[in-house]
Amino acid sequence: MVNTLLLFLAELLLIGPGPDALPSAPMALLFVAVGAAVAWYLAYGPAAVPAGDTTAGRTGAMRRRSERSAVPTLRDPDAAGRPRPRAPGAAR
């Protein structure tokens, strides 16, 4: 498929369009669009298009950060043997 398209474009560039081809302005626009796409691909390669969801990197970073943080120790204020907290003020 790609080889056929490249062969067709090379033939158009070397020989020129036939008498029944597109008018010159749309053909020039087609050449500019295809040329820009090929130049973009050659300059940036397939890595220019993001592959998949880009939020996965952020969520992974958040998960790694939470794994590095210290786990808070939980305390039970109503455990056996602990005094009950009292309100401030004098007891009557």
Image (tube, helix red, strand yellow):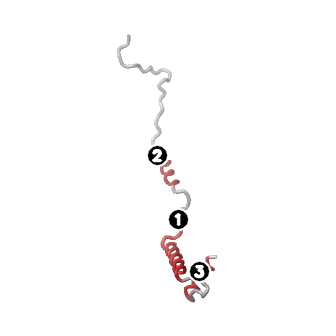
Above or below residue 90? Residue 52 is below
**Between 39 and 62, which is closer to the camera in this rendering?**
39
Q: Local crowd at mark 1 within 10 Å, few (<14), some, or many (≥20)? A: few
Q: Would residue 6 be found to the left or right of residue 70 on screen?
A: right
Residue marked by disc 2: 68
Q: CA distance from mark 1 to mark 2?
A: 32 Å
Helix, strand or loop under label 3:
helix
**Between 6 and 88, which is closer to the camera in this rendering?**
6
The quadrant of the image that shows the C terminus is top left
Callout 2, which amino acid?
A: Arg
Residue marked by disc 1: 49
Residue 50 percent across, percent down from the top left = 52, 62
The quadrant of the image that shows the N terminus is bottom right
Quadrant housing residue 4: bottom right
**Between 92 and 48, which is closer to the camera in this rendering?**
48
Callout 1, which amino acid?
A: Val
Callout 3, which amino acid?
A: Leu
Residue 40 percent across, percent down from the top left = 49, 72
Residue marked by disc 3: 6
Q: How many circles with numbers are drawn on the protein?
A: 3
Residue 63 percent across, percent down from the top left = 50, 48
Q: Local crowd at mark 3 within 10 Å, few (<14), some, or many (≥20)? A: few
Q: Which mark sits nearer the N-terminus, 1 or 3?
A: 3
Q: Which mark sits nearer the N-terminus, 3 or 2?
A: 3
C-beta proximity under 8 Å, tags 3 and 2:
no
Name the residue rendered at 50%, 54% in the picture: 57
Q: Which mark is residue 81?
A: none
Above or below residue 35? Residue 72 is above
